[in-house]
Image: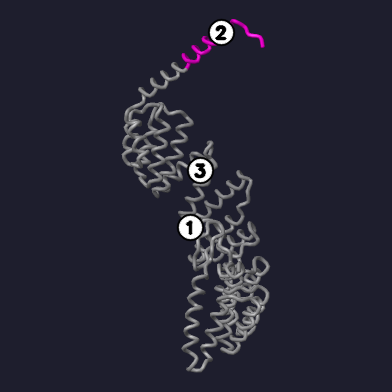
Amino acid sequence: MQFELWWLWALPVFFALGWAAARIDIQHVLRESRQLPRSYFRGLNFLINDQTDKAIESLLEIVKHDDPETLDLSFVLGNLFRRRGELERAIRMHGSLLERDDLGAEQRLRALHELAQDYHKAGLLDRAESYYRQLLTTAYRASSLVFLLQLYEQEREWLKAIEVARELAEDQGQSRSKEIAQFYCEQAAIEMAQGQSEQAAEHLSSALSVNRLCVRANLLLGDIAAQAGQLDQALHSWRRIESQQPLYLHMLVDRLLKLYRQRGELTAGIALLKDFLQKYPTPDLLAGVYQAMLEVEGPAAAYALVRDELRRNPSMTGLDKLIEVQLMQAPPERQGDLQLVKALVHQHTRRVAFYRCGHCGFMARQFYWQCPACNNWETFPPRRKEEDVLNAN
């Protein structure tokens, strides 16, 4: 191995250069730390000790100086106020940013976007809508459209919601047909309550043109026709649900029974419902058909229906109805035991009879077209949780 004498001179030089560079970096860090306000370090200390309120007050002392380097901190504090529900402070913080002369164009748009969200959460929807509208031609268009859609749903401005949903679908390249169809149905429901049946029917037709599988549109179209005495037209609209999504047929039980009573053909109506139950069995449909048969044909026929259905498709609802009809026919000495069994089964049936949102998992005893928790549309399946439990076993 050859060894050059000049290496002995180079090594100390390299060491000295490294030492000098390290000293310069340390001095730079120390110089910057001296320039930071003392309140900055107090705020960090409070955050480390989970003293959020004191940390906020310390950091607020920094942003009061309107230093350009504190802009990001101002945005952070404003967002923190909004998340904590301190909306007045959030509005003041973001509003003061908009009044600053040293704010750049991009930062001004950001402040406007944050202020719109503050007003939205505070319930000042007119102001929020105005700011979102101003941002539609900027880089914040996508998020502003999403917030506008939420705002119009909150205000029940369904026609405006349809317009925004169409813009979102076009921008994102994603279908929003289910959502738009439900908006048409919501608008139609308002018009039906106001006696504007023709306008409601037009909007329901629009819902079906957007989403041909919209069960709710045919439900409401049938309701409009039935109210007008057009029973054949009502029956036609309701029967179309079988070709759309037959698991929603249980929603027709009361409607169909009322219609066939008006026509004087209640037996035919029960036969139709029994046919539905044979082809598309669900606990809700069984409960409806059972109640109709109990009223029209008596306990014996209702018992036979439930017994046969339990053999084909076991369910807690079916067992509950079977015990109920047995209790009606049992002699007095057996009624006590049957009443005890029925109470236990009914309690368990109520415990498992839930609809579960497929998006967020929210559970409810009644069916919703829009989940009350996550606000998504058509995420509640027509089947109740009971069937999921039985199928899992």
Between disc 3 and disc 1, the foreground one is 1
Please tell me whether the stretch drawn in magenta is mainly helix, strand or loop.
Answer: helix
Between disc 3 and disc 2, the foreground one is 2
Residue on which disc 2 sits: 8
Residue at image coords 43%, 32%: 72
Whole-angstrom CA distance, mark 1 to mark 2, is 74 Å
Q: Which mark is residue 144?
A: 3
Give the mark nearest the N terminus, 3 or 2.
Answer: 2
Amino acid marked by disc 2: Leu
Whole-angstrom CA distance, mark 3 to mark 2, is 67 Å
Q: Is residue 3 magenta?
A: yes
Q: Residue furthest top?
A: 5
Give the mark nearest the N terminus, 3 or 1.
Answer: 3
Looking at the picture, how far across and down is residue 297, in whole percent? 59, 88
Q: Secondary structure at mark 1?
A: loop
Looking at the picture, how far across and down is residue 174, in whole percent? 63, 48
Between disc 1 and disc 2, the foreground one is 2
Residue on which disc 1 sits: 373
Q: Secondary structure at mark 2?
A: helix
| Looking at the image, residue 321 lies above or below residue 92 | below
Looking at the picture, how far across and down is residue 80, in whole percent? 40, 41
| Looking at the image, residue 359 lies above or below residue 292 | above
| Quarter of the rendering containing residue 51 | top left
- The residue segment tinted magenta is 1-21
Give the mark nearest the N terminus, 1 or 2.
Answer: 2
Amino acid marked by disc 1: Ala
Looking at the rendered image, the quarter that the N terminus falls into is top right
